[in-house]
Amino acid sequence: VVIQRAATEMMIRSLKEVRNLAACEIQRIWRGFSAHVDFMMKVMAAMKIQARYRRRRARSALLVLSSQRKSSTIIQKAVRGFFARIHKKGQLAAVVVIQRAATEMMIRSLKEVRNLAACEIQR
């Protein structure tokens, strides 16, 4: 009876140890899985934050680029207008020079005609 009781206690003890080891292994696996899930959730949250930050930064860069494009268009418009006015002034000055030359030529021609007419009258 003593041997049976000792054998039974030993079997119960080894069964408890096996169950305890199995429970520890299950807990170890569960804690590892739980820690992995928590880590992956944090990684995904960080990725979402980074994506939103990059999206916002890209939008602001696009707005800056579009405002720069508008600014460059305005500058181009002003420069083109400036050059057009200079060109128009140059053309106007050329017209004035041509008109002056034509007027002087007509006056010279008229003087010559009058001079010839006066010479004819005097003869």
Image (spheres, helix red, strand yellow):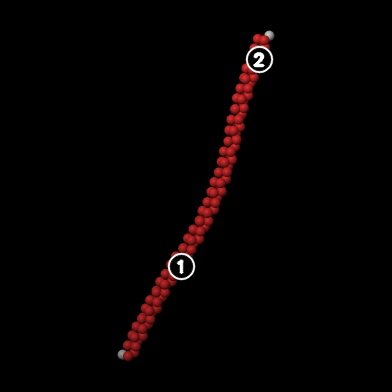
Relative to 120, is 22 above or below? above
The foreground one among 122 and 17 is: 17
Label 2 sits on residue: 9
Residue at the limit of the structure toward the front, as seen here: 2
Q: Quadrant of the N terminus?
A: top right
Classify 36 as above or below 70: above
Q: Residue at x 36, y 81 (%)?
A: 108
Q: Nearer the viewer, residue 17 or 118?
A: 17
Residue sitting at x 51%, y 56%: 68
The image position of residue 31, as x and y in percent, is 60, 30
Q: Amino acid at mark 1?
A: Arg
**Could you tell me which residue is drawn at 32 percent across and 90 percent down?**
122
From the viewer's perspective, tell me whether residue 8 is left or right of residue 53. Answer: right
In the rendered view of the protein, which quadrant contains the C terminus? bottom left
Q: Residues within 10 Å of mark 1 (few under 14, many from 20)?
A: few
Q: Residue at x 53, y 48 (%)?
A: 58
What residue did someone put label 1 on? 85
Q: Given the image, on which type of amino acid does mark 2 rest?
A: Glu
Q: Within the image, what quadrant is residue 19 found in?
A: top right
> In the picture, residue 105 is in which quadrant?
bottom left
x then y, percent, for residue 55: 55, 47
Estimate how packed mark 2 is, as few (under 14), some (14 to 19) or many (20 or more) residues with alpha carbons within 10 Å. few
Residue 50, by quadrant, is top right
